Amino acid sequence: MRGKVYLVGAGPGSPDLITVRGLNILKEADVVIYDYLIDKRILENVKEDAELVCSGRTNNLIIKKAKEGKNVVRLKNGDSSIFSRCSQELESLVKERIEFEVVPGVTAASAASCLSGIPLTDRRFASSCVFVTGHEDPTKKKSLIDWNSVAKSPTMILYMAVENLDDIVNRILKSGKDKNTAVAIIQDISLSTQKVLTGTLKDIVTKARRRKLRPPAIIIIGEVAKLEKEFNWLTKNRRILFTGLSKERFFIKGTYFHLPLIKIEPLENYEEFDNYLKHIKNFDWIVFASRYGVEYFFKRLKNIGLDSRVLNNIKIAAIGNSTKNRLLDYGILADVVPEKESSEGLTKKFKKINVKDRRIFLPRSNISDKGLSKAFEELGAKVTTAFAYRNVMPKDLPDLELNFFNEIMFTSPSTVRNFKKRYKKVPKNVKIKCIGDVTLREAKSCRLLD
């Protein structure tokens, strides 16, 4: 039995720009062969036993895995069919008679247009546009780009052209394009590091060198590029750097850039935690201080052959709405949820409940604050805490121009500490917002706030 192959466009940057169809296929793949340019967060959607391979030239690997009976996703940056060597891969699949499908993706040109406010066409002065590669196969004896014809288009969109910008601009000018033609360069499209540089053909090379622009980037040349000043909604909106893991919320004021400064990982060894779960009926209360505590609690419960029926006669508390809602996913309705989503709010709620000599189980992260267990002990409860997951600092956090943001929102003490470790300080003109008193105290302790 041979596997099936899907060529899937991942979108140009942010992991949520993949199509719904592409995401659903990705979740079922046995093997994912992906470009190095994709945002690695998208790989969090694959199934646990999926094989992940980062590779550029992949024809032989795709064929090999499909012949092994594996269902393969070839995950490409942007759209699968635009400047991505799609033809070579399709030729190999056809030759080997392997079944395949191609799934469209959001191409970088479209994303650059939308996320800079530059329409690629405009009925006043651009009824057509042309896509051009700035980096052809070096083995070619002759270029396939007719710059005289390309330069006549009212809008030119250049892919992979930043490193050859000087030469490309000279070719366009020699083809008769006015030196005052507007140009915009959009780097790191859709990411928190996105930059937009505008100029004209006569000065864009100098400006790009001064700003040290680098790939990946899209270059838009034409009168439409002048519209960036008027239509760039990103620079007009309040820009907020969100450091937590919560899903993005929409129809709220401001544009949120999600850059999680924490990462949730399983423990290396669950022997101790599992042992508590095997004797969970010995407890009167289970207090969940995060939705991740809920997730790993029920994962481990399933792993040892139990389910929510063993929680009969045990009271359940959730620290806030997101934790409460995660419990609902497992069919559990929390008995206690505080109005104020914090350790203080939960403690205040329990002061009205008699927990003297009651046994409380508190699953938590490896670095969570011990204040909650101490508060329960002061109320007379017998508290057992156990690590359910690890809270770690993500690797390879990007360089940021922090002055680009109007506000930075910290969601937990660990986001504060990791920010301090990676970025040192917050610019004076950038506002800081902290969720919860504990987070606020940590921000002051780290001297991010006075």
Image (cartoon, rainbow, N blue to C red):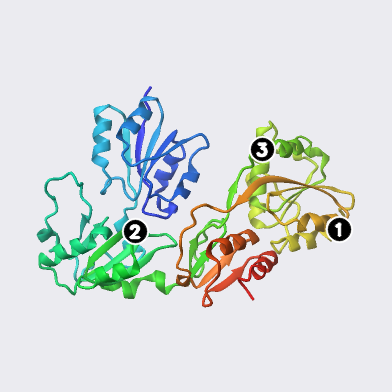
Which mark lies nearer to you, 3 or 1? 3
Residue under the point 37% across and 59% down: 188
Badge 2 amino acid:
Ala
To which residue does mark 2 refer?
A: 111
Disc 3/disc 1 C-alpha distance (Å): 31 Å
Report whether 262 appears left or right of 210: right
* Quadrant assignment, res 14: bottom left
Badge 3 amino acid:
Asn
Q: Height in image: 135 above or below 399?
A: above
Residue under the point 60% across and 71% down: 448
Report whether 123 appears left or right of 216: left
Q: Are marks 2 and 1 in contact (CB under 8 Å)?
A: no
Quarter of the image with the N terminus is top left
Q: Are marks 2 and 3 in contact (CB under 8 Å)?
A: no
Pointer 2 local density, CA inside 10 Å: few below 14, some 14–19, many at least 20: many
Disc 2/disc 1 C-alpha distance (Å): 55 Å
Secondary structure under tag 1 reads helix
> Residue 254 at what x, y percent from top left?
49, 69
* Quadrant assignment, res 235: bottom left
Badge 1 amino acid:
Glu
To which residue does mark 3 refer?
A: 269
User: Which of the two labelled residues, at mark 3 and mark 1, occupies the earlier sequence position?
Assistant: 3
To which residue does mark 1 refer?
A: 378
User: Which of the two labelled residues, at mark 2 and mark 1, occupies the earlier sequence position?
Assistant: 2
